Amino acid sequence: MANQTPTLTGKQAVLQEMPDHPAIKALLAWSPEAFTDARFDFGELTLTVVSTEIRAACATVQAAGYNFFEDMTAVDWFPQSPRFQLSYHLLSHAFRERIRLRVLLDEAEPSVDSITPIWPGANYYEREVFDLFGIHFAEHPDLRRIMMPDDWKGHPLRKDYPVEGYR
Amino acid sequence: MSEKSGAPVLELPATESTVPRQMVLNMGPQHPATHGVLRLVVELDGEVIVSVRPEIGYLHTGIEKTCEAKFYQQVVPLTDRINYLDPLSNNLCYCLAVEKLLDLEIPERAQWIRVLLTELSRLNSHLIWLGTHAMDIGALTVFLYTFREREEILRLFEAVAGQRMMTSYFRIGGLSMEPPPGWFERVAAFIRDFPEKIDEYSNLLTGNPIFISRLKGVGTLSAAEAIALGVTGPPLRASGVDFDLRRDMPYSSYEKFQFHVPISTVGDTWARYEVRLVEMRESTKIIQQALDGMPGGAIKADAPKIVLPDREKMKTQMEALIHHFKIVSEGFHVPAGEVYQGIECGHGQVGYYVVSDGTAKPYRVHMRYPSFATLQAVETMCKGRLIADLVAVVGSIDIVLGEIDR
């Protein structure tokens, strides 16, 4: 269980230590500016992608062997800026490894391209983030609330939403 | 009933009528075949399904939000309530994620007991699936047989954790306590008889012509569709994808166990039935190996600031008392960072995404549960088939609404 892998912080360090990583190679082949930041800790690789490029980045790593969309969710870093972080967990059946793509979004009208056209399985996950965080997904086929009632006000998983709800 | 898969079962004659032929049927939220408060909005053309739209959220309790207000160790009991049929897998996945953040070394004995209990938990989950699935199809008897064995598993859970369903037995850093004397012998006795019980279920169902005709060729899902829709676990393996986290990305010393991962390439409801039946046999083998090779030693990590001290020490040693007081009253600090831990539970891949900001409470906990993704595949599996097939399909994907709505 103990963490034997070293922590690598920053794009430079990750590029130096892991130049042959399939996801990194594929992303750099697609565009040298594909990811702005990288981190390797707890044995997990995190790549920060520009928010407007997430769909293209997902398509690139999908072609590179990360064939399975496992999970997607958001983190609210209120009151920091940028406020929202989206974490995509993509799994490769062939490499037996998963990577995390990270997108940072500003507080005002957070919106990002939907990846449902690439993985139809992302549909519910994006609806959940839309419902509980209020993040909009462009070109999502069916962007409705999924957990809360349709007429609900507010987004419960935002940090400025009280745990006990509004009274 | 047609044996062809994919194609519509009924060819309806074209009519001149301008009246729309489609009917919308509400199945659930209270319906015996939806296994909980699931509402399926089914669009029908006669008896043929045109579209299925699951409406979920009836059981949403905001567990992810609640986690943010609890200490790390207080989240463990919340995880039981998510997938209440496979409680120990939830405990395990959460504990592994936090242990990864803490960089904790878990004693081998604790890891082996964890494997043993998650496999028992998988049997529990599969037994409920088998009983309820057969009941949906109309074979009521099987339910009574599977619940007979499930009862013994629950008794084993009770003996070890003090609770039948909401076990919370795995703690961050190990287990809550040593199993009681004679417990391993009880597990051994149960495992010795269990393969015979699987034969019994198989005798009741595998040759049953009604069961066969309701399942074979129904709800086919190809490997590509399963991957695209995020389907995991037995339904994925029944569609021909050879992937099991226990073998391919082992955790909690699963790499030390020998087992076979059953695969079928047919991808229909029958394949999912067969895969799970073999999985139960493999689970008994893993439990047997765990019993045979059970290492001795501690069941808790050596981390006094994180793991609660033994009761005896807490009553007699000042330092242990202080640690106990500190952990209970203000929790323990977890280094900042984010981790994702995936494990294979009875239904498929569970994942816990834990984000820490360095305090004693998790900044964000997100759970990936297999039923949530698998539910999206229902429409693909049912389109163009009869409404009765919907019941078979929903039964075969083995959903738990607690884990869908969280």
Image (cartoon, coloured by chain):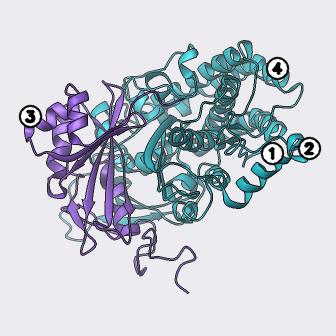
Chain colours: A purple, B cyan
Task: Mark 3 vs mark 1: give the one in front.
Answer: 1
Q: Which residue is mark 3?
A: A29
Kindly indicate whether the residue at mark 1 contacts the one at mark 2 (C-beta within 8 angstroms). yes
**Image coordinates for residue A148, horizontal then vertical, percent:** 45, 71
Q: How far is the residue under mark 2 from the one under mark 1?
A: 8 Å
Query: Mark 1 Cα within 10 Å, few/some/many (few <14, many 20+)?
Result: many
The residue under label 1 is which amino acid type? Answer: Ala
**Residue, disc 1:** B320
Q: Between marks 1 and 4, how big is the CA–CA gap?
A: 38 Å
Task: Using the image as rendered, state which of residue B199 and residue B18 is in the foreground.
Answer: B199
Q: Residue at x 57, y 55 (%)?
A: B402
Q: Which amino acid, mark 2?
A: Thr
Q: Which residue is mark 4?
A: B189
Q: Distance from label 4 to label 2 (Cα)?
A: 38 Å
Q: Amino acid at mark 4?
A: Ala
The lab-note entry on whether marks 3 and 2 share a chain reads no
Q: Amino acid at mark 3?
A: Ala
Quadrant showing the N terminus of chain A? top right
Residue at image position (61%, 51%) is B79
Q: Residues within 10 Å of mark 4 (few under 14, many from 20)?
A: few
- Compared across the picture, whether B181 is left or right of B141 comes to right
Q: Quadrant of the C terminus of chain A?
A: bottom right
**On screen, residue B26 above or below B159:** below
In-front residue for pair B22/B51 = B51
How far across and how far down the image is residue B98, in percent? 55, 44
